[in-house]
Image (spheres, rainbow, N blue to C red):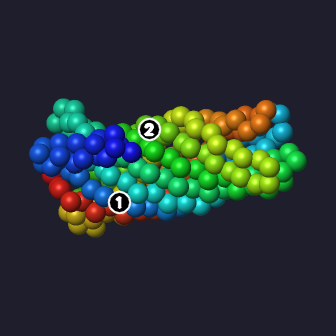
Amino acid sequence: MKKLMIIVVSILIMTALGQAQFGLGASAGMLNPGLDKSDVSESQFDPGWGYEFLIRHNLAQIGDSIQVKARWSYRYFKTTTELPNVLEIWFKFNYLTLDMFVDLLKSETFGLYSGLGGSLVSVNAEKDFLKVTETAFVPEIVLGGELLLSQYYNLFTECSFQFGSIKTNDDQIPLTGFRIVLGATMFLVTE
């Protein structure tokens, strides 16, 4: 936890010193990690709900027109699935995510962006005698749009596609799916 705090504080200092854009935000929405079934038990995750908190900042300038942005986020989502001999069980997903993205289109009031990211996902579930605690790396592709309300505020909607799997008993349940969220960002430092 200390290392994470040191990293976050370092990012805040570097961003403020460079006068790069920096913002805090939150979003909520749906996660559907169940586009694929497992091979052994044919278990598949149902759509679920969740929220996230994020830190967003400019990362690098490439040429005159391309700005690479980074977003660090904590995500919490909850969903169910049916496992053999257990029936329905709730799974909790805790994501630590880093996304990097660029603007595809940008105007004074609207922006369309896309990028790549990765998450360290901790998955927990417990019911009767079954306890599942797994950690996996999950890459993702991000596509989103933002409405710029002012210099300091935006609303955004985003869809990301993730790929991966977790182990439960003798089975690998795929985490391949998508996430759709609606959120807002408050920029503390603007360009």
Looking at the picture, which amino acid does disc 2 mark? Answer: Gly
Would you name the residue on which mark 1 appears? Answer: 25
The amino acid at mark 1 is Gly
- Residue 130, horizontal then vertical, whole percent: 77, 47
- Mark 1 is surrounded, within 10 Å at the Cα level, by few (under 14), some (14 to 19) or many (20 or more) other residues, namely some
- Determine the residue located farthest toward the bottom in the rendered image: 149
Of residues 4 and 173, the one drawn nearer to the viewer in this rendering? 4
Residue at left offset 65%, top offset 36%: 165
The disc label shown at residue 117, or none: 2
Q: Is residue 101 visible?
A: no
Tell me what residue is drawn at x 50 percent, y 60 percent.
51
SS at circle 2: strand
> Which of 188/144 is in front?
188
- On the rendered image, what quadrant is the N terminus found in? top left
Measured from the top left, where is residue 170 in percent x and y? 79, 32
Q: Looking at the picture, how far across and down is residue 181, in whole percent?
A: 49, 58
Quarter of the image for residue 90 reads bottom right
Secondary element type, mark 1? strand
